[in-house]
Each structure stands twice: as C-alpha cells, then as structure tokens.
Amino acid sequence: MLQRWKTPSETHGGDAVELFGVDIGGSGVKGAPVDLEKGKLAGKRKRIKTPRPSTPDAVAEVVGEVVGHFSWSGPVGITVPAVVKEGMVRSAANIDDAWIDIDGVALLEERLGDPDTLLNDADAAGLAEDRYGAGRDTDGLVLLLTFGTGIGSALVYRGTLVPNSELGHLEFRGMEAEHYCAARLVEEDDMDITWWTRRVDEFLSYLEKVLSPDLIIFGGGISKRFDEFSELLITRAPLVPAELRNNAGIVGAALAAREGTSP
C-alpha cells in the first residue's frame, strides 16, 4: 500500500486533499492536481501532444513535462491505453507497440523520481465515475463504456475495480465489438447516428446477458449527444451519460494513487 505524504494543500493548511493524475492518450498527454474531496481538478490541466512515435521513453519525457509544469513533488497516478498487470504493460492501443511488455511503473518512476501508480485509462475513468460521477449512488456492479476511436470499458463492484476488462475487444457479429460500434464509425463511414445507435443497442443487450450490471454509464466524446439517441437504447439496467467527461482519467488516476489501486 502506498504511504501517505503531505500534499501542497495540506502544507499550507487547506482542507482539500490533492494528488496528481496524468492521462496518457493517443493524441495528448494531460494532467493536473486533483481535489479528491470534490473529485475535481484543482487547477487548469496541462496538455501536451502525444509524441510521434509514441515510444515509452518519448511519452515518459512528456509525462515529466506535464508533472514538472506544476512543480509537483510526490507520487503520481498515471493512465495508459493498455492492459496493465503488476506494473507491466501488456498491450498497446493508439500508442507505439514498443510499450508491450515494458515495466511501465519502473520507466515512469525513473523519469519522475517518485512512486507511481499505473492503470488502464478506462479503468481510471470507471473509478472516477463510480466515486464522484454518474455511479456514485449505485451499490452494485457499475459498467462504464467509453465510445470513441475504440470502446473502452471498466467494471467496478461496490467500489472495487475489476481491472482490464477490455470488453471492446470481445468478438461480436463476426468482428471485434469496437469495429462494429465504436463512435469513430459515425464519422469514418458517414453512418447515420440512428443506424449506429442500433448497433450500440445490440452490443449493450449482449453485455447485459453476460454481466447483469446494476448501472451502465455511457462515456466517450459522443456522450455529449446522449440526449439525441438515448431513447433508442433499451437496457434493463439504468443507462446514464458520464458526468466527468474528459477529466475522468485524470481524476481516476489520482484516486488510484491515493488508494493504491494498481492491477
């Protein structure tokens, strides 16, 4: 378990408990201190474009720039778009394949000089939504799905993360589910959103048969349009849009750092 340390807000007598979160994405690396009492960023986030190629060393350098921008000292929670097991990165989605089988925690700790917690980006978003967002009043199994370039997923049962679910890679209709109903298809294939929504509804129905969640949280950039298509999604469990949106990964990463939630 991570030891607790003095944060800047505590040092100056503030009431907030602040930790730092970084969200590594395919297009950008963003981070900020997080007020974990409120589940909100404690300041304006810093974003730097993900380097090309997005090799481990290049990305670690950018993470260092983001953290250094705030003169932060102390452990940091970090997300990566990959399966993470015991600090080892076991896959790579929208980042360079050189990440596969890298000890991500060791790499980042060498760059930052402090203990770090590394976890899957969708898992971090799921933790944040479960604690502070759309899932905060649910006592049961919460399923978060993020629809974007692919489909990210997180399962949280009574506050405990079931890591690396990767439901977007399930075989569905003869292909990976994210090839069937990721949000990118709406633009790439010029799909009418109604047609796309029917596909999403099929996938949600399948997941409900397998998992029987108590709540489904609909995330990703397209969740901004949730009201346009939500009536076409028929689920047994309540279906609600994500609340923390683009900050969920940062908030969840900081929360994982505080609680030692590392798969």
Image: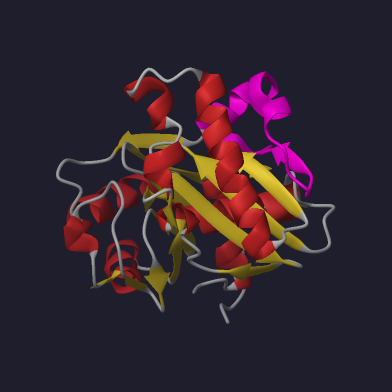
Is residue 183 visible in the rendered structure shown here?
yes
Left or right: 170 in relation to 203: left
Q: Where does the N terminus fall, quadrant-wise? A: bottom right
Q: Position of residue 93 (x, y in %)?
A: 31, 51
Judged from this view, the residue extending furthest toward the front is 174
Q: Which residues are magenta?
A: 221-245
Q: Position of residue 198 (x, y in %)?
A: 57, 31
Left or right: 2 in relation to 14: left
Q: Position of residue 75 (x, y in %)?
A: 48, 65
Q: Position of residue 258 (x, y in %)?
A: 61, 66
Q: Which residue occupies 28% across, 57% down? A: 92
Q: Which residue occupies 41% across, 79% down? A: 86
Is residue 74 visible in the rendered structure shown here?
no
Q: Which residue occupies 55% across, 38% down? A: 200
**Residue 184 higher or lower than 216, as above or below:** above
Q: For residue 106, which quarter of the picture?
A: bottom left
Residue 229 colored magenta? yes
Judged from this view, the residue extending furthest toward the bottom is 1
Colour logic? secondary structure
Camera-side residue of 239 and 109: 239
**Residue 164 higher or lower than 190, as above or below:** below
